[in-house]
Amino acid sequence: MNWETFHHPDWSLPVIKRRMSEHWIDLMKDVGEILLTNGRSLLWNHSYPSQTAFNMAMSRLKKDGLLVSYEDEVRLPRLKLTSTGKKSLPAYHHPEKHWNIDWNGIWYVLIFDVPEAQRHYRDNLRRFLKKIHMGCLQKSVWVTPKDIRPAYDDLEQAANVHAVSYLFEAKTVLHLDTEEIVNNAWNFGQLQELHDRYLEVFGRNLTLLSQDHSEDAVLLLLNQEAEAYVQCMMNDPLLPSSLLPRHYKGKQVYKLHSKIRKEIANTLLRNNK
């Protein structure tokens, strides 16, 4: 089956298979639990090139405390997310928790000045701020509606960040209204392109799922959808709903993501009865 692909020349899809823990947690979240409760792992022979590779990956996962397996004499291993594994999921796998936050009207503003001689420190600090979804108003002025004081305290204790930065609480920022702050700090234009592309491609693929497909074809779609979803959502700041731009379609993407995952699981179950 030739599924419609998410590829775009301006976007680089992450190689999720190299990030084995996150990839397996993601698949388990929506599809694996449905399949594995029937006692048979349909992903067993499809996600890894060999039994040895699978066993090695599972060993690493169990060592991390992310997944556990249960075995008996009849069934293949049944996998289940531990509470640690669920907490380790990236934010975009449970975005509704962030959209549903009631914003208290306070912005957290981080201002830093790192000397050019310490460029490595500065670049790593910026990477960290992006990772926790802060928005960049200017190169050294970052903002978020989320209380980042715990993360800032960690930086202060571990990286002496207080020597080069200040963290403020503010009701207003640079005399900008809330909409202007959001649009200036985060690139919602690029997000909209990604969201529109995802909705177009996987809306069509969801329709194609109603036809008969081989197990291999359905599992191929599962992996393609996982890569596309992460690409769409990994840079989404997941702001409280009251702050989201009117054109924001992340909620539609998440709804379609959940729907297509469930349909893939149901298709695999039907094919293996």
Image (cartoon, helix red, strand yellow):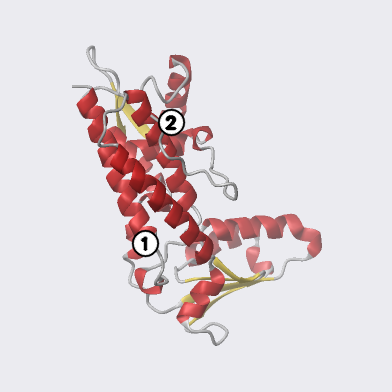
Q: x%, y% of residue 43?
A: 35, 25
Task: Please tell me which of labels 1 and 2 falls first in the chain.
Answer: 2
Vertical relation: 119 (above or below) 214 = below
Residue hosting label 2: 61
Left or right placement of residue 192 versus residue 115 in this view: left
Residue in view at x 54 percent, y 82 percent: 173
Which kind of residue does numbered mark 1 sit on? His
Vertical relation: 212 (above or below) 156 = above
Q: x%, y% of residue 194?
A: 48, 55
Residue hosting label 1: 98
Residue in view at x 37 percent, y 54 percent: 253
Q: Residue 65's quadrant in the figure?
A: top left
Which kind of residue does numbered mark 2 sit on? Leu
Left or right placement of residue 29 versus residue 125 in this view: left
Left or right placement of residue 218 versus residue 164 in this view: left
As measured in the structure, the alpha-carbon distance from the residue carrying label 1 to the one carrying label 2 is: 27 Å
Q: Answer yes or no: is residue 82 visible.
A: no
Which type of secondary structure does the marked residue at label 1 adopt? helix
Q: What is the quadrant of the C terminus in the image?
A: top left
Count of marks placed on residues: 2
Q: What is the quadrant of the N terminus in the image?
A: top left
Q: Which of 248 and 54 is in front in this view?
A: 248
Residue in view at x 70 percent, y 60 percent: 122
Residue in view at x 39 percent, y 61 percent: 249
